[in-house]
Amino acid sequence: MSIAAVGVTALVVLGACSPPAEPEPTAAPAGGPAPTETAAPPFPTTVVHSGGETTLEVAPERIFTFGAQQTHSLLALGIAPVASGGGSLGPWREEAIGSLGAGVVPTIDPLDGDTLADVEAVSPDVIVTALPFQPFDMDPTSWLAFYNDLPEVAPTIRPPLSALDSPEFSSSDSWRETLLQMGQIVGHVPEAEAHLASIDDSLAAHAAAHPEFAGKTIAVISPQGGSVAYSKSNTAVAALLEQLGFTYADDSTVAYNSESDSGKVYYLWADDVEQLDTDVLIYIGDPVGAPYWVTFVEASATGADGVIHYPGFLDEPTLGMFAPTALSVPWAVDAFVADLAASIGAP
């Protein structure tokens, strides 16, 4: 296998071969339909990403995925990684691995004390990563050293270029782009497109089954660092809610004390929470038996009857829809829609 990677500033793609010949039209029998062109082969292919360009001569057989979106995208295409890391919460990962009969897929993560030697031990052909982040419970210097040194083990493909515009889990469509990128890496672009179309069809079917969602306003908030984070209308969950028929609340009139660096979240004080006036307000936070912010949320203009309270981000339907991946959305959408319907008194 020949896999070559270059940085953004490189002038030549190492190991690249001459482009394949143009596909020959398929001949048609006399009197038959017009000839059709044979589909171009998926390899070689050059993946353009936020870390540069990587040319794959053939489909990689041993992929180490570092990031939940990357892991789930590969599994959604029917391929198990040789190992994965970078977070992969939720039951959908293990269910997908089980359905593939792939056995145990080891987890390699610096948060667990793993090192580059552990990555080398699984002999990946290629590594596909998420964006870097700073763990709260680990020295970011050592974590970033692991992340930055992955190319020493194998050619490393970073997220699509668009991921640089905003943090991965906040981008409204990064999980879709990650799946399409993985489709290119393994030569399954049509399958990736079909998977996304299936998800969109499911969301449209739910919207059709719940016409009462149409025109209802909705917003999502969660506690962060002594204030409440208000997810703006350019986030992934807002896009999914609008596909279900809701209208995500106009955030241009929200009073807030600060804004995230990504431009995706407003931070509100308690008094600011009281202003929120939507038909449905989803609140993620406050464990059961220890309410705090939820009292402010239920006292908002929305009113307690319109609040859906998920006691913690790791609640499964919440995680599946608010940190969406190619696996989590199909897994979580039915339960999530049922909660939405109940919040507005739908039968």
Image (tube, grey):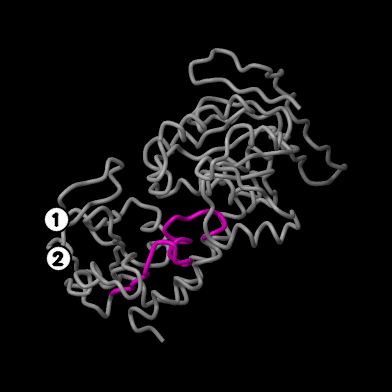
Q: Earlier in the sequence, mark 2 or mark 1?
A: 1
Q: Is residue 340 left or right of residue 297?
A: right
Dots 2 and 1: beta carbons under 8 Å?
Answer: yes
> In this figure, what is the number of numbered marks?
2
For disc 1, the marked residue is: 255
Q: Which residues are magenta?
A: 307-328
* 344 vs 275, nearest the viewer: 275
Residue type (three-letter) at the residue carrying disc 1: Ala
The image shows residue 91, relative to residue 193, as above or below, that is: below
| Quadrant of the drawing holding the N terminus | top right
- Which residue lies most toward the bottom here? 347
Q: Is residue 302 magenta?
A: no
- Which residue lies most toward the right here? 30
Give residue 329's position: percent from left, percent from top.
51, 61
Residue type (three-letter) at the residue carrying disc 2: Gln
For disc 2, the marked residue is: 275
Instruction: Estimate how packed mark 2 is, as few (under 14), some (14 to 19) or many (20 or more) residues with alpha carbons within 10 Å.
Output: some
Give residue 195's position: percent from left, percent from top.
60, 55
* 252 vs 99, nearest the viewer: 99
